[in-house]
Amino acid sequence: MNQPLKVLFLAAEAAPFAQVGGLAEVATSLTQALRRLDVDVRLMMPRYGSIRSRDYDFQRVGNSIAVPVGPEEEHVHLLETHLGELPVYLIWDDQYFSAREKIYGFNDDPQRFTFFSRAVIASLAALDWQPDVIHANDWHTAPVVVWLDVYGRALPAYRDIATLFTLHNLAYQGVCGRLILTFARMDKVKHLPVEPPGQVNWMAQGIAHADLLNTTSPTYARNILTPERGRGLESLLTERQERLFGILNGINIDFWNPETDEALTQTYNRDSLRMREVNKAALQREMGLAARPKTPLLGFVGRVEALKGLEILIESLEALLAEAEFQFVLLGTGDPLLEQALRELQARYPAAIRVYLKFDPRLARRIYGGADIFVMPSESEPCGLGQMLAMRYGAVPVVRATGGLVDTVVDVTTAPQRGTGFAFEDYTAAALTVALRRALLVYGDEAVWRAIQKRAMEVDFSWDASARAYLDLYRRAQALHDR
């Protein structure tokens, strides 16, 4: 009888333990979908200070684990808990993780996550379970991939472990000085042509050393082969493009379900969309806006940063407010300068604009379930979850045609009978304004708008198909590793 494939999934963040972006959703939703395919997948991440022992049933695995870094060793503990049937391991280290509440944003982040990667390798010896494949995500876990290729192949305990490296966002590459290799005891790692002199780029190193690579949408896999989207790594990616694939992210449709979501004032489905108006009115009141059923309500949920298109969004909203009546609500945190610009926008238009600069998952669900239009004007978007969640809840997306947004949103103007949202090409406030005008115009035709909402809600964004595609990549990675 064949044994289930054993996969160790590595991520810097995972819901509900610690979350900043979409990676956290992927980490738990994809792994749980893989377990439904009988893959023996397990998740490993750092234990941050924000993860309280009182909230989870943690069990210590074995004794302390010696991690070889710098001139000596750092001792860590391995904790285990479960999300349903999914085993979750957390690396507990006070110096780099457990004494800090935040996930990212420290000056020593390259050192912190290099340490985490070395702790992952050391912890394998403490488990009575060994993976066939390690699935690493983004630069934070790339040193694992590099170590296995440069050092692990010579060691019986590691030589058979294949690797898949997922690129969630090339905007973050983990660039640091080459002394990091001395800290990690990885001095054999060679300098790459795409790396600046005297520096290590962990994203590039992961790309160079993984058995297989993938992005989180097919279009983004093609985009990053170009100078416009490759962020300096396009030549390396082009060299390895035969091993590069694009798999669209999914969403957890059991959790993100307007029929059962207890965060909503009123649950509903595609056949009871009129009930959704209760959520719109409740959201308007909650955000301090006039409860006007006929006034279009626009929403944004996400990181407040340039890559998410906030600069052009602010300019576009100001232009539209001079010619149309609508309301806009925003939830997110990020760049202090953009946060201030949003506060100023709200101060100028208090009757139309509301910004909540915080992280609030329940409010996010109420925005998905109450907004008429969901705006996502990203400069770059490897996949994007916001547009899929919005469509699941019947909020019609207005998106820039880039990355995974191309793969998930069908433009109503170009395909009136199939359209699920509105898309624009040029990354300018003017192009976004035109797209928003189109959406606001169509919103005025209730029958057409309802048809768009229903088509959007019908799209299957479940993880099942994506999980099967990942299982295929794991098998391919094994075959390539064994050559």
Image (cartoon, rainbow, N blue to C red):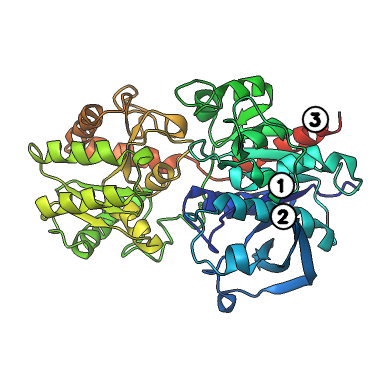
Asked whether disc 1 touches disc 2, contact meaning CB atoms under 8 Å apart, the reply is: yes
Q: Residue at x 31, y 50 (%)?
A: 273
- Three-letter amino acid code at the position of disc 3: Leu
Estimate the spatial distance between the alpha carbons at disc 1 and disc 3, rounded to whole Å. Answer: 30 Å
Estimate the spatial distance between the alpha carbons at disc 1 and disc 2, rounded to whole Å. Answer: 6 Å
Tell me the SS state at disc 1: helix
- Horizontal side of 301 relative to 254 (left or right) equals left
Residue 319 drawn above or below residue 118: above
**Split into 4 quadrants, where in the image is the C terminus?**
top right
The label number, if any, that marks residue 480 in the structure image:
3
Q: Nearer the viewer, residue 334 or 9?
A: 334
Residue 211 drawn above or below residue 92: above
Q: Position of residue 409 (x, y in %)?
A: 40, 33
Instruction: Tell me if I can see residue 293 in this picture.
Output: no
1 or 3: mark nearer the eye: 1
Q: Position of residue 3 (x, y in %)?
A: 86, 49
Tell me the SS state at disc 2: loop
Instruction: Tell me if I can see residue 328 in this picture.
Output: yes
The label number, if any, that marks residue 70 in the structure image:
2
- Horizontal side of 301 relative to 292 (left or right) equals right
- Check disc 1 and report the residue beneath it: 182
- Three-letter amino acid code at the position of disc 1: Thr
Marked residue nearer the N-terminal end (1 or 2): 2
Q: Position of residue 374 (x, y in %)?
A: 31, 44
Marked residue nearer the N-terminal end (1 or 3): 1
Tell me the SS state at disc 3: helix
Give residue 451's quadrant in the image.
top left
